[in-house]
Image: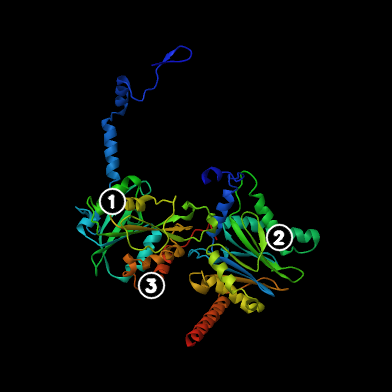
Amino acid sequence: MAATFFGEVVKAPCRAGTEEEEEEEEESRRETPEDREVRRQLARKREVQLLRRQTKTSLEVALLEKYSCSKFIIAIGNNAVAFLSSFVMNSGVWEEVGCTKLWNEWCRTADTVHLSPADAFCVFYQLKSDPSVLLCQCSCFVAEDQQYQWLEKVFGSRPRKTTKITVLTCRHVTEYKTSESVGSLPSPFLKALKTQHFRDPVCCSLLEQPNIAHGLPAAVLSYCQVWKIPAVLYLCYTDVMKLDLITVEAFKPVLSCSSLKSLAKNIPQSTDILKKLMTAEGTQSNIYT
Amino acid sequence: MASRYDRAITVFSPDGHLFQVEYAQEAVKKGSTAVGIRGTNIVVLGVEKKSVAKLQDERTVRKICALDDHVCMAFAGLTADARAVINRARVECQSHKLTVEDPVTVEYITRFIATLKQKYTQSNGRRPFGISALIVGFDDDGIPRLYQTDPSGTYHAWKANAIGRSAKTVREFLEKNYTEDAISNDNETIKLAIRALLEVVQSGGKNIDLAIIRRNQPLKMFSAKEIELQVTEIEKEKEEAEKKKSKK
C-alpha cells in the first residue's frame, strides 16, 4: 500500500507479490482439462518423427546412434539440397536410411497425417561405399519449437565428438548486415561459421559480426558447440531464394573442403544434372521479365 | 533501422537512403539479363529469353520493344511496370512527332522515361517503377546512342552496359572485351553482344533474343536461326583460339 500526493491510499504494485495476489494469479493460470487436451493434441501434431521411409516405422533410437558416422553433411533449403543432389549424390551410390516427418503452420496442407515428401520430410542417406558418411536433404521448414526435437531425434542425447558436421544453407542477401550498400555486394557469396572444435580450414571467409545464423542451421551449430562436436556452417547469401542455378553454383568452393573433397567426382556431369533439375522445376512466374 | 524507413516512399532514412528505391533496384535484379552495345555504325540489344510455359504464346513475352522506328529499348524487372512505361514512352514519341514534326532524339525519350520514374520516387501513395531500361537508337545526326535508366530516375549514356540478373558478370566481360576493334565492324559488335550473354545464359543460343538498329535502317529482330548461326561461329572461333593456345 502506498499514499499518493493527494492523501489517498492505493494498492502499490509489489514485485515480491502478496499472498492474495499469488492465489488470484494461480487460479487464472490453472489449466482446465480442455486446455490440457488442446495442448496435448498440438504437441502430438507438431511431433517430429524419425522413420524408416520405406516401411514408415519409427526408428527407436536416434539416427546417429544407429548409424555411427565420421562425416555428416546437412543441406537445408532448396538451393543447398540441389547442390548436394547434383554434385555429391551423383558421384556414388547412396542408400536412404531414414527420414524425419513433421508438420507445422508452414506446411501447405492442413492434413498432418498424409504429408507430401516435398512438404515435410528431411531425408537421410548413407554412402554405400563408405557407410561412415551420412547426408541429410532437408527442404522443409523446421519451426523453432521443433528444432530441439529434430536434433534429439537425429543426434541423440549423447552425440559422438568424432563426427564432423557440415551444414549448407542459404539466406537472402538483404539480411546480411554490412556498412556497404546491399546493391554493391557480389551476391551470391559464401560465408562460414564454425564451432570451437572445428580445426579444418574453411573454404571461404568467416561470417562477420553482427551477422548471425538462423533457424535449423543455427540450432545444429549451437548443439554441436555445446557438445564439443566439430561443425561448420556454409551460408550462401543470395538475392534469389527460389531454386536458382547461380546460387547453387555459388556453393562450389565447398567441394574443396575436407568433408566433401572425396565425395564430388564428376563435376561436368553434375552441371548437367543441375540444369535438368532447373528445367524440371518448371517455368518462372511472369511477374519479372 | 531499414524497417522504419521503408514503408513510405517519401521518407529518407537518417543516413540518406530512400529504401523503396533501393528495393526497386533489387526487383530489377530478378529480371533476366539484357545487354546493350553501341558500335560505330550499329547499336545492338541482346536479352536472355525467359523460358515460357508450354501453353503460353512466346510472342507475348518480349523484353525488347520498339518505342519508335529509330528507337528501341530492352528492360529488366517487373513486366507490368515495363508495359506502363513503354506505353507512355510510345505515346510521347508520337506526340513529339506531331507537335514538332521531328522524331524524338534518343536522349529526349530517355529523359522522358527517367523523369517519369523520378516522379514516382517523390509522390506519396506511389511506389517506384521496378525496371531498368537500356534505350538504343540513332539520332538524325547519324550518331548511335545507348542510354540506361534505373528506378531512381537517373539516366546515363554508355558505350556498353548490362542490366538484370548477373549484370555484374556481363559488365565485367564487356569491360575486358569492348575495344575499338571489337566494335569497328557490325558483325563483330553483334558477336560481342552474344558472347557477353553466353557468359551467363544457361542453355546457349536458343535462350537469346537479339535486335539491332543500323544507321538509317529500321529495327531488325534476329530470328532464332540467325542467332544460332552467330553462336556456331563464336564457338568455332573459341575452339580455334584454344587450339592456337595449346600449340604454343
Label 1, label 2: how many angstroms apart (C-alpha)? Answer: 60 Å
Task: Give residue B79's mark.
Answer: none
Mark 1 — residue? A151
Label 3, label 2: how many angstroms apart (C-alpha)? Answer: 48 Å
Task: Give residue A267's mark.
Answer: 3
Q: Residues within 10 Å of mark 2 (few under 14, many from 20)?
A: many
Helix, strand or loop for disc 1: helix
Q: Is residue B159 left or right of residue A18?
A: right
Along the viewing direction, whichever of B199 and B206 lies nearer the viewer: B199
Along the viewing direction, whichever of A152 and B109 lies nearer the viewer: A152
Q: Residues within 10 Å of mark 1 (few under 14, many from 20)?
A: some
Image quadrant containing the N terminus of chain A: top left
**Circles 1 and 3 in contact, beta carbons < 8 Å:** no
Mark 2 — residue? B109
Q: Nearer the viewer, mark 1 or mark 2?
A: 1
Chain of residue at mark 2: B
Where is residue B97 shown, x and y percent of the image? 77, 61
- Number of numbered discs on residues: 3
Q: Which residue is at 60% across, 55% downward?
A: B81
Q: Is residue B113 left or right of residue B194?
A: right
Q: Which residue is at 65% across, 53% downward?
A: B117
